[in-house]
Image (cartoon, helix red, strand yellow):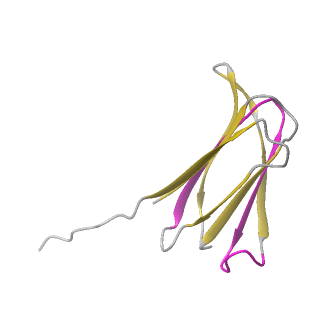
């Protein structure tokens, strides 16, 4: 007997050009438990706040703060999580810069 495993892949990303407010991206991870977050900031040393909730747009819990660092000519932060929460929200605490900030969330 063989067991067939099917994986759900969910990915969401957004670019923010010359952000005037803190870029934020929220994703419904549905039934997935493994998530990765990748963020690119305009400048180094920017805080990335990772939050999670089981309710859409409510009851956010702070999971972790990451900090962007220089890597291959870009300022990035990357981390993987095993999460029981359905919704994940990532906020890059950067505004007023000139350039493009990117937030990407992938779940499987």
Q: Position of residue 53 (x, y in %)?
A: 69, 74
Rendered view: 105 above or below 26: above
Q: Between 98 and 52, which is closer to the camera in this rendering? A: 98
> Which residue occupies 30% across, 66% down?
6
Q: Position of residue 29 (x, y in %)?
A: 54, 67
Rendered view: 100 above or below 78: above
Answer with left or right where residue 29 lies relative to residue 75.
Answer: left
Q: Between 14 and 80, which is closer to the camera in this rendering? A: 14
> Which residue occupies 80% across, 28% down?
98
Answer with left or right where residue 11 lies relative to residue 105.
Answer: left
> Which residue occupies 55% across, 57% down?
35
Q: Position of residue 32 (x, y in %)?
A: 48, 68
Q: Quadrant of the C terminus?
A: bottom left
Answer with left or right where residue 26 lies relative to residue 41.
Answer: left
Q: Quadrant of residue 69?
A: top right
Q: Quadrant of residue 27?
A: bottom right
Q: Quadrant of the N terminus?
A: bottom left
Number of numbered tags placed on the structure image:
0
| Membership of 50 in magenta stretch | yes
> Which residue occupies 52% across, 67% down?
33
Rendered view: 4 above or below 91: below
> Going by the picture, which residue comes out furthest to the left?
1
Rendered view: 55 above or below 16: below
Q: Which residues are magenta?
A: 33-59
> Going by the picture, which residue comes out furthest to the top?
73
Q: Position of residue 2 (x, y in %)?
A: 15, 70
């Amino acid at each position: 007997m063989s067991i067939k495993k099917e994986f759900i892949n969910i990915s969401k990303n957004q670019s923010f050009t010359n952000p005037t407010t803190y870029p934020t991206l929220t994703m419904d991870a549905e039934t997935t438990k493994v998530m990765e977050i990748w963020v690119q900031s305009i400048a180094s040393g920017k805080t990335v706040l990772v939050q999670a909730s089981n309710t859409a747009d409510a009851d956010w819990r702070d999971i972790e703060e990451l900090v962007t660092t220089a890597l291959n000519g870009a300022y990035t932060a990357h981390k993987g999580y095993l999460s029981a929460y359905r919704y994940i929200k990532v906020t890059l605490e950067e505004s007023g810069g000139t350039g493009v900030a990117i937030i990407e969330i992938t779940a499987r």
